[in-house]
Amino acid sequence: MKKKYSIYSLVKNSLSDNQNWKKMWRNPEPRKFYDVIIVGGGGHGLGTAYYLAKEHGLKNIAVIEKGWLGGGNTGRNTTIIRSNYLWDESAHLYEHSLKLWENLSAELNYNIMFSQRGVLNLAHNEHDVKEIRRRVSANKLNGIDSEWVDPNQIKKLVPIMNTENCRYPVLGASYQPRAGVARHDAVAWGYAMRADELGVDIIQNCEVKKIRTAKGKVQGVETSKGFIRSNRVGVVASGHTSVLAATAGIKLPLQSKALQALVSEPIKPVINTVVMSNAVHAYVSQSDKGELVIGAGTDGYNSYTQRGGYNIIEDTIRAIVELYPIFGKMKMLRQWGGIVDITPDASPILSKCEVEGLYFNCGWGTGGFKATPGSANVFAHTIAKNKAHKINAPFSVDRFVSGRLVDEHGAAAVAH
Ligand SMILES: Cc1cc2nc3c(=O)[nH]c(=O)nc-3n(C[C@H](O)[C@H](O)[C@H](O)COP(=O)(O)OP(=O)(O)OC[C@H]3O[C@@H](n4cnc5c(N)ncnc54)[C@H](O)[C@@H]3O)c2cc1C
């Protein structure tokens, strides 16, 4: 390994003002042909390349990224990781991911700061209580650590929460102790480093303009650096996936919308778990720097402007201040948006398609960060074997024809 992190390397490099660290990955010019091309240098794309090289022995792989690594939704999300989804299909997928998260820092020899501080999903009315209790039972049947907690238990976990004197009182919550957060950029960088070591070419600042196909087979991609040939192309471009699919004549059932988040000025530790609320539409955790990391909802219309409407911020902050009056006078530091790709059943697409050699990993909507290692792992399998892994078989694009949907609108903590 070129870039091994250890106590020894940290001390040695600190003695030379950290000026002698090797580059984390190469910056190669694209070759004319690759065995596999992955479009999109977010966590899912980089992870896919890593598992293709590591677990399937493929060496001639490129990841093509139009901007910089992790500059898409991977570096824009609020980093919540959990696996407490309703349906068996989703539970298997997200739990596969959570298990990989638990060992990811060691696997990548890079600290992704995975912190299992638990997640609460609040219930504010009788319907929420029933829906969340049903989900807790389903989670338990799937071996997922999920429990129902009452307002007293919530108060112990989050003493600053106002559970009673508000328009939507807190009647209880689901709690998943193994859930948590991770440092999102580090996930992209960790996968990039290890994929690069395994020979993957990571090509940044190179936009894929068109997926070229002929006679029902993929031929390669036309990019801002010229045409690159390949018989296998995996598209992992989140909010821009449907645009790329259209260049190959494929219409995917995706809508692209802005989803936004914001962080406050840093304060001392006040909240040591993640709290999400579907009903009042706000979620919050506290970063290691002390900032409150606040997530909002999607805009009500499709767009590609990575910003998000101000009305959404107002609604979110109103809900946050009602739930946590103590935050009422805090200043918000910065706000941003990302373009998320939403399917009709709020579940992802991890699938082959009618064009031979063309694969899609998309439709993660507002919740794909948590799935990064699991999705990348099974997508690599799908590309390498040209066959779905049993975990992602239910997430084929065909389900929108057959009607076998995996409807997770209730568990996707940000309604869309
Ligand atoms: C504000 C916000 C908060 C969120 N919070 C959470 C959360 O708390 N928990 C959670 O699980 N999920 C969350 N998500 C969702 C999550 O971020 C995404 O589902 C996930 O990061 C998607 O990863 P990805 O690798 O598929 O996509 P991305 O990281 O977006 O990577 C796709 C890449 O493709 C590149 N690309 C696009 N078009 C082209 C092209 N033509 N040529 C070359 N490259 C191209 C882009 O530049 C981008 O880097 C949130 C998203 C947002 C926006």
Image (tube, rainbow, N blue to C red):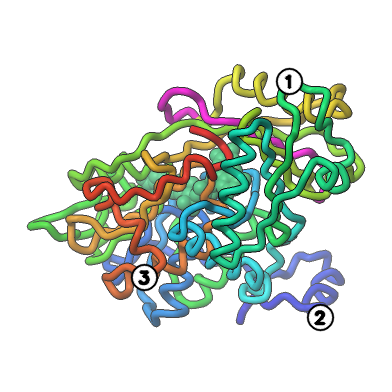
Residue drawn 37% across and 78% down? 58
Q: Pointer 3: what residue?
A: 389
Any part of residue 67 in sight: no
At label 3, which amino acid type do we have? His
Closer mark to the observer between disc 2 and disc 3: 3
Magenta stretch: dominant secondary structure = loop
Q: Quick one: 126 or 31, which is closer to the camera?
A: 126
* 336 in the magenta segment: no
| Mark pair 1, 3: CA separation | 46 Å
Judge whether 306 appears above or below 143 on screen. Answer: above
Q: Earlier in the sequence, mark 1 or mark 2?
A: 2
User: What residue lies at 67% left-to-right and 19% top-to-bottom?
Assistant: 314
Give x and y (percent) for residue 169.
75, 28
Q: Which residue is mark 2?
A: 8
Left or right: where 340 falls relative to 218: right
Amino acid at the residue labelled 2: Tyr
Q: CA distance from mark 1 to mark 2?
A: 55 Å
Instruction: Give the number of the mark in front: 1 or 2.
Output: 1
Q: What residue range appears in magenta?
A: 288-305
Q: 381 left or right of 67? A: left
| Closer-to-camera residue (359/227) | 359
The residue lying furthest to the right in this view is 268
Quadrant of residue 163 in the image?
top right
Left or right placement of residue 277 versus residue 325 in this view: left
Q: x and y percent of residue 253 in the render? A: 30, 40
Residue ID at (61%, 53%)? 136
The residue located at (83%, 30%) in the rendering is: 162
Residue corresponding to mark 1: 167
